[in-house]
Amino acid sequence: MTAKIDETDRRILTVLQKDASLSVDEVSDRVGLSRNACWRRIRLMEEAGTIRGRVVLVDAARVGCPLDVMVMVRTSAHDAKWMAQFQKVIRAMPEIIGAYRMTGDLDYLLRVRVADVPAYDAFYKRVIAQVPLSDISASFVMEEIKDTTALPL
């Protein structure tokens, strides 16, 4: 279901996507609203789930996980029990920063952040020890051309 947001909400969201640490006063100045009107709109978008949370974006290299890995997973099991176990394992592994069930040739795509290739190998061994997979392969990111959390509003 698409949330009903107007152009003012879009301006507020655009500002907050760039810097969620701004005060309501700063946001209201940038979007041309009174402080109270801006605060009400933000609160309503939070209550509606349009704004799901506020986070800090951390530089992966500076905290010891510079290697970005795209992991492609294929499985021959598609029953509810296997899926529940797979999801439990995936959600418990902090190295996995994104996990997606896919259409097409792949069953799942995982985005993983680790320190280096040996750390990826240790991650790989932990995954295959916990859940049966038909195939798992990885591609290491050579260059990050674009990586954003901002949605096109």
Image (cartoon, rainbow, N blue to C red):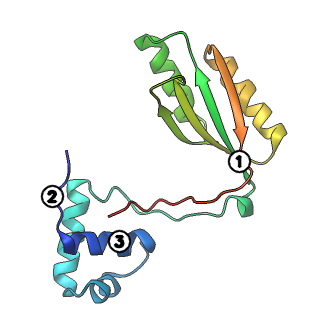
Which disc, if any, is residue 141?
1
Identify which residue is drawn at 66% across, 25% down: 127
Q: If you read the primary sequence from the N terminus, does the residue marked by circle 1 or circle 2 appear first?
A: 2
Name the amino acid, label 3.
Answer: Thr
Q: CA distance from mark 3 to mark 2?
A: 16 Å
Q: Position of residue 57 (x, y in %)?
A: 55, 64
Residue 138 is left or right of residue 19, and the answer is right
Identify which residue is drawn at 69% across, 27% down: 137
The residue wearing badge 3 is 14
Image quadrant of residue 135? top right
Give the secondary structure at mark 3: helix
Q: If you read the primary sequence from the N terminus, does the residue marked by circle 3 or circle 2 appear first?
A: 2
The residue wearing badge 2 is 4
Give the secondary structure at mark 1: loop
Residue 150 is left or right of residue 68, and the answer is left
Tell me: residue 79, above or below residue 25. above
Identify which residue is drawn at 40% across, 13% down: 80
Q: Position of residue 109 (x, y in %)?
A: 55, 33
Give the secondary structure at mark 2: loop
Name the amino acid, label 2.
Answer: Lys
